[in-house]
Amino acid sequence: MKDLCALNAKKTIIDGVVIDMFENRQNKNNTSGFKGVYSHGQGFIARICVKGQHYHGPTRRTKEEAYLDRLAFEEKLLPEVARQEKDKKE
């Protein structure tokens, strides 16, 4: 079995939140073009998981509107220290 200690050591964890999950590249199977935005019925929905809790927004007609919901979730749910770290990297 592979030793995961080295992988876990590379993670940036602030206030119990794995920051790398919000900053890494998109998955290659992402069809919406936005991280955290998924097709849902006739529209799109924003989803986020912070500290094991899953949050989702209402169904929106466009993926851009759903992405704005995703950004609002990040602003509301991520710790202030994490937002500062994210801003430094951008």
Image (cartoon, rainbow, N blue to C red):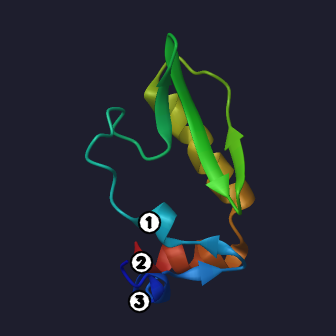
Image vertical order of residue 76 relative to residue 4, above or below: above
Three-letter amino acid code of the residue under disc 3: Ala
Comparing labels 1 and 2, the label whose residue is closer to the camera: 1
SS state under label 1? helix
Q: Nearer the viewer, residue 2 or 29?
A: 2
Three-letter amino acid code of the residue under disc 2: Lys
- Which residue lies at the image location 40% right of the left edge and 72% below the top edge? 90
Is mark 1 in CB contact (under 8 Å) with mark 2?
yes
Q: Dividing the picture into quarters, in which one does residue 25 lie?
A: bottom left
Per the image, the residue denoted by label 1 is 23
Comparing labels 3 and 1, the label whose residue is closer to the camera: 3
Per the image, the residue denoted by label 3 is 6
**Residue 23 vs residue 82: left or right?**
left
SS state under label 2? helix
Precedes in sequence: disc 3 or disc 1: 3
**Residue 1 vs residue 50: left or right?**
left
Residue 39: percent from the left, percent from the top?
Answer: 46, 24
